[in-house]
Image (tube, helix red, strand yellow):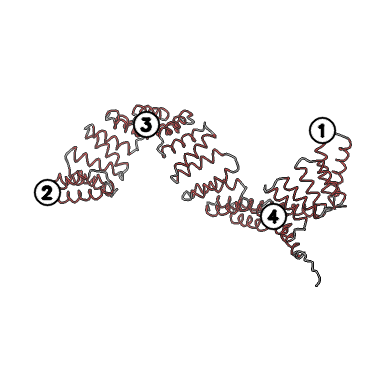
Amino acid sequence: MTEQTITPMLAPVSSVEGILEEARAAHEKYLIKQQDSDLEHAIECYIDAIKVNPAMSESYYRLASLLLIKGQITVDGALEQCKTALSLEPENPNAHIYTGYFQCLNGNYDEAEKEFSYAISHSGKNSARPRLFLSKVLFNRIKNHNHSVKNLVKFLYYFLSGSMMIMWDCPSIKMFYKFLANDFSIMSYKTLGETFEKMKLFPSALEAYSKGLEKTSQGNLFYQKMGDLSLECNDIEASLEFYKKAHEVDPADREVLIKLATINQTYFPENPDETIDYYNSLLEFGKDLDKIYYELGHLYLAKADKIHAVSAFKLAEELNPENPYYNNSLAFAYVKAELYDDAIEYYQKAIKINPDSEWTSIVCHALGAIYAEVKENFEAAEATFNAGMVLDPNNVDIQLSLGDLYMSENDLDKAIKTYCDAITTDPANYLAYAKAGLALWEKDYLEESVVAFHKSIEINPDFEIAQNNLGVVYLDGFGDPKESIDYFKHAININPNYTLAYFNLARAYQAMGDKPLAAEYYQMTLDLNRITEELSAKDIRKRLYDLFE
């Protein structure tokens, strides 16, 4: 029996060449169009080629260059790949060119010169590229103060000879032609589309960009153009889809991410999570971080995620502590988180910076509300409200809040004056008339109260509180239950869940001696109060039972 030798089975040459050809094509497309999808495809093909036939040196050095671009290996890692390629094919000029290039990146110019010199000697008339690379190495030496005549002569020789011999370098000529052809095609479709846009021929512009995408595969550019055009035509959903496709083509395009985040945040507030993802991706670029954190804070507030909102606004404020809007938003987030002392600190800081009197007056209003409603520090609240009115005398909201503060302290004269000041500032403010009417009623100025409530209803007939309160004045002030009934009914028609209006209507019918209707409305009040819990259930039941005693 004879001894048999077992040899490893290699894939057919045609199979390997097919994979390599696909890899070269994707590599070439990436060099021309700079699209990540082509880069990924080329890497996958080179890896497949190595798996199919590990003895093909070309796969190693080309794969090394792409992995280096993608940041998956270091220059030293790329040189290791080149060593593998040279061990398989020591006389391959391209392997030496790539090795020389990586040595340049590592700063090893002497080693790079050796590699390029070897490639020149073994490339014949196709030695233009290594000659130009070598001239660059020599030029770097000259720049680094090595001004020897020998280096200068060598630089000129290799630079000029490389420039002349480029005409015989077929791969370089082919690539140059493809660059030109692709660039011309991109420019043509881009210019055509922009011309149609200027002529307001939007469908024709969209068709030009679509053809440009088809002919050049320059997805990032033409998808953006179609997205911009759709946005101009107010087709928001189409623009969003085009920008998403542009993002898929080139995830590293920051401008596309900004457009996606902005459109999603503006037009699709119901999808905060998707917008948050876009802003988080933008953080990776390391630019305008404070602005991104500021937007993220608002998005987290929209989700009622108070902890993340505070964190985002805090990061924005730390990056730009003198930005009043960051301080104000951080304070608001602290209010939502019920951290009122922290909120006060940042509201005070925003007020101190004071970028604009009207805006700062609004911040004073917010701070005064905390002092009044949470801290019950009426002096601080009054001082803050007054400061806000000094900043903006036309801020009616802050005048009304100051009036409410006086009402809570039972200082009716000051409350009436403040509400009247608000009416003077804004004669069409129905709320100011209603509040003034209530203060006048408490002061027993019945006629004046009626005038104020009627004016509030005249301005806004659907304001149920004024309707109810006017009924109370007629019922309890003038002792005219019949006149009050219509106002209570109007309040109920406007707001069917207005428990107090049902209660007052029941009182009016009771005052008129109509016990069945009074009982009916007391029972309705009792039923509704189980949900709203506005009134004392015990008091309602007592009034109901007293009807039949």
Separation of marks 1 and 4 at Cα, in angstroms: 40 Å
Residue found 41% across the figure and 36% down from its top: 339
Residue type beneath disc 4: Ile
Separation of marks 2 and 4 at Cα, in angstroms: 91 Å
Q: Residue most toward the left?
A: 549
Q: Residue most toward the front?
A: 1
Q: Position of residue 176 (x, y in %)?
A: 77, 52
Residue type beneath disc 2: Phe
- Report the residue marked by disc 3: 371
Please state which of the two labelled residues, at mark 1 or mark 2, is closer to the viewer.
1
Please indicate, yes or no, whether residue 476 appears anywhere in the rendered image: yes
Separation of marks 3 and 2 at Cα, in angstroms: 48 Å
* Badge 3 or badge 2: first in the primary sequence: 3
Element type at mark 1: loop
Please state which of the two labelled residues, at mark 3 or mark 1, is closer to the viewer.
1
Q: Residue most toward the bottom?
A: 1
* Badge 4 or badge 3: first in the primary sequence: 4
Of residues 383 and 94, the one drawn nearer to the viewer in this rendering? 94
- Report the residue marked by disc 1: 145
Q: Quadrant of residue 388?
A: top left
* Badge 1 or badge 2: first in the primary sequence: 1
Residue type beneath disc 3: Tyr
* Badge 3 or badge 1: first in the primary sequence: 1
Element type at mark 2: loop
Residue 43 numbered tag: 4
Q: Position of residue 519 (x, y in %)?
A: 17, 50
